[in-house]
């Protein structure tokens, strides 16, 4: 999950085959933008931005940069902080979203919501090769009129990551992520997404690491060590 900082260094976009013009729908969240443009900041504490270009729409939204002090074990540019190496499961995630461009079954916009959830996984190796998996992730929120919004995912990304000055830097290797947005069980959006990333400040604390946002005081995510 929104307009953020200048476009991040790494960006790839999915170009769907031509289809006749259709009514524009989209999600413009703070940490995850789905629909016309899908940006998932999700990021597993490494807040990653996922961008989707829907038919005939080139709009792109970027996620907020996260904040947090670097862990004491952080090293210089090009190295990988040892505290990030291992298997991780997302245990906390929260962010605000503007879903005014997303329509429910009756064609009514969803509006502003606050989402919470967990389930994303990371496997980060000492070489910086990293796998981010979303199959178990689910984020939920409620519209002001009580409609339930659920974000579900399949697939994930392969990354090459490193750390520098308390920030995680990403380089995309491959991706097969898909995201679905359900409003009261109605599938309002379903898209393949390609990520783009800004460097992410992080903080390690024992067997966990966290990231927060400079642009959204309500946004945060935590990962804990897993088997």
Image (tube, grey):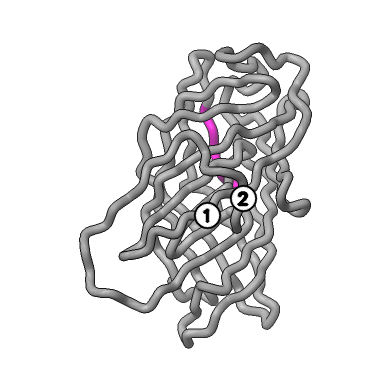
Give the quadrant of residue 53: bottom left
Q: Residue at x 31, y 65 (%)?
A: 55
Q: Is residue 45 magenta?
A: no
Label 2 crowd bin: few (<14), some (14–19), many (20+), radius 10 Å: some
Closest to the observer: 1 or 132?
A: 1
Position of residue 12 measured from the top left corner of the image (x, y, whole percent)? 37, 42
Closest to the observer: 222 or 192?
A: 192
Please say if 86 is above or below 36.
Answer: above
> Is 60 left, or right, of 147 in this rendering?
left
Magenta-drawn stretch, dominant element (helix, strand or loop): strand
Closest to the observer: 81 or 205?
A: 81
> Is 127 left, or right, of 207 in this rendering?
left
In terms of secondary structure, where does tag 2 sit? loop
Q: Which segment did they paint magenta?
A: 118-123
Mark 2 or mark 1, which has the lower sequence index? 2
Label of residue 4 in the image: 2
> Is 213 left, or right, of 61 in this rendering?
right
Whether residues under marks 2 and 1 lie with C-beta atoms below 8 angstroms apart, the answer is: yes
Q: Quadrant of the C terminus?
A: top right
Q: Residue at x 58, y 13 (%)?
A: 79
**Residue placed under numbered mark 1 in the picture:** 61
């Amino acid at each position: 999950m929104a307009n953020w900082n200048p476009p991040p260094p790494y960006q790839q976009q999915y170009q769907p085959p031509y289809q006749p013009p259709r009514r524009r729908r989209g999600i413009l969240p703070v940490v995850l933008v789905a629909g016309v443009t899908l940006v998932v900041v999700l990021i597993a504490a490494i807040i990653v931005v996922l961008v989707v270009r829907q038919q005939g729409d080139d709009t792109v939204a970027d996620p907020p940069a996260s904040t947090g002090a670097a862990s004491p074990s952080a090293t210089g540019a090009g190295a990988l902080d040892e505290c990030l190496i291992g298997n991780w499961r997302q245990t906390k995630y929260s962010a605000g979203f503007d879903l005014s461009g997303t329509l429910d079954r009756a064609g009514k916009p969803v509006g502003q919501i606050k989402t919470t959830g967990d389930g994303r996984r990371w496997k980060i190796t000492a070489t910086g090769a990293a796998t981010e998996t979303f199959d178990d992730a689910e984020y939920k929120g409620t519209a002001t009129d009580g409609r339930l919004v659920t974000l579900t995912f399949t697939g994930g990304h392969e990354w090459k990551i490193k750390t520098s000055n308390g920030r995680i830097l990403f380089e995309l290797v491959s991706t097969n992520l898909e995201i679905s947005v359900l409003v009261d069980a109605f599938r309002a959006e379903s898209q393949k997404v390609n990520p783009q990333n800004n460097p992410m400040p992080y903080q390690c604390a024992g067997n966990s690491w966290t990231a927060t946002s400079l642009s959204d005081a309500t946004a945060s995510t935590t990962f804990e060590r897993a088997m």
